[in-house]
Image (tube, rainbow, N blue to C red):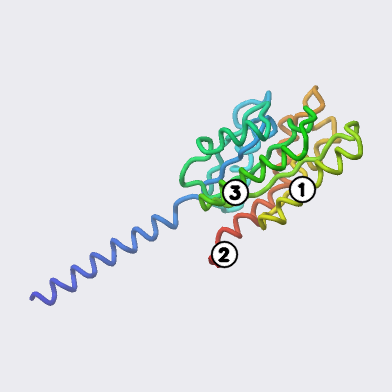
Amino acid sequence: MAFKQLLRAFAAAGLVWAGSVLAAAAEPVEIVGFGDSLMAGYQLDAGQSFPERLEVALRAKGHEVTVANAGVSGDTTSGGLSRLDWSVPEGTDLVILELGANDMLRGISPEITERNLDAMIARLKERGIAILLAGMVAAPNLGQDFMASFNGIFPRLAEKHDLILYPFFLDGVAADASLLLDDGMHPNAEGVDRMVENALPVVEQALARLDRPAG
């Protein structure tokens, strides 16, 4: 009799363990889009920002994810560094790091931009959070020297930290007026959808990397 009770206890424990494993497996991957107005959804309606549209696109492809919007319009890399710790909550699995455009527009030294991004990447890695680095390119009117220095930031950091790099966050949108707001700088709703479409394979690559065995 006691032996049967012991078996039932083991069986119950096994069911509890299996249930906890299934519950853990069902938890969505937590993604944070950390950036400036391009991430925040400047002048767009609710549901039209890059993180919101990315979540819809990923879920449509069968990925159990949530994508939080931690974009702040006007943010520089200095501002991002100062708010990083409280803007990216515990439990985050992946950060899409998109900052640098406002540094470029304000003519901030690329060395400062790179140093700030480097510090943010290091902090996230210390917390065990994966990073997809979204790059930016300098405007041609800033001169060849500035362009060369600024444009090299993102490939250098991706190589240094073994990150997946999406080279240009506005790829396919920046030169198309039909996909931009009247300011000619920020994407409209259709532009955001194009950005999501173009970035989706790289985001999926970053998600796949989360499943790699450590070491």
Distance from disc 1 to disc 2, alpha carbons, whole Å, reads 23 Å
Identify whether 11 is placed above or below 57: below
For residue 73, what is the image quadrant? Answer: top right
Q: Which residue is mark 2?
A: 212
User: Under tag 2, what secondary structure?
Assistant: loop
Pick whichever, 85 or 43, lies toward us.
85
Give SS at disc 3.
Answer: helix
Is 70 rendered above or below residue 18? above
**Residue 183: x %, y % from top left:** 80, 23
Residue type at tag 1: Pro
As drawn, 89 above or below 22? above
Q: Amino acid at mark 2?
A: Arg
**Neighbourhood count class around disc 3 (C-alpha, 10 Å): few under 14, some 14–19, many 20 upward:** some
Q: Residue at x 45, y 51 (%)?
A: 27
How many marks overall?
A: 3
Residue position for label 3: 122
- Density class for disc 2 (Cα within 10 Å; few <14, some 14-19, many ≥20) is few
At label 3, the amino acid type is: Ala
Is residue 62 left or right of 197 when viewed as pictured? Answer: left
Is label 1 in contact with label 2 (beta carbons under 8 Å)?
no
Label 1 Cα neighbours within 10 Å, binned few <14 / some 14-19 / many ≥20: some
Numbered tag placed on residue 40 in the rendering:
none
| Along the line of sight, the residue nearer the viewer: 61 or 21 | 21
Q: Pointer 1: what residue?
A: 167
Task: For mark 1, give the secondary structure.
Answer: loop
- Foreground mark, 3 or 2, reads 3
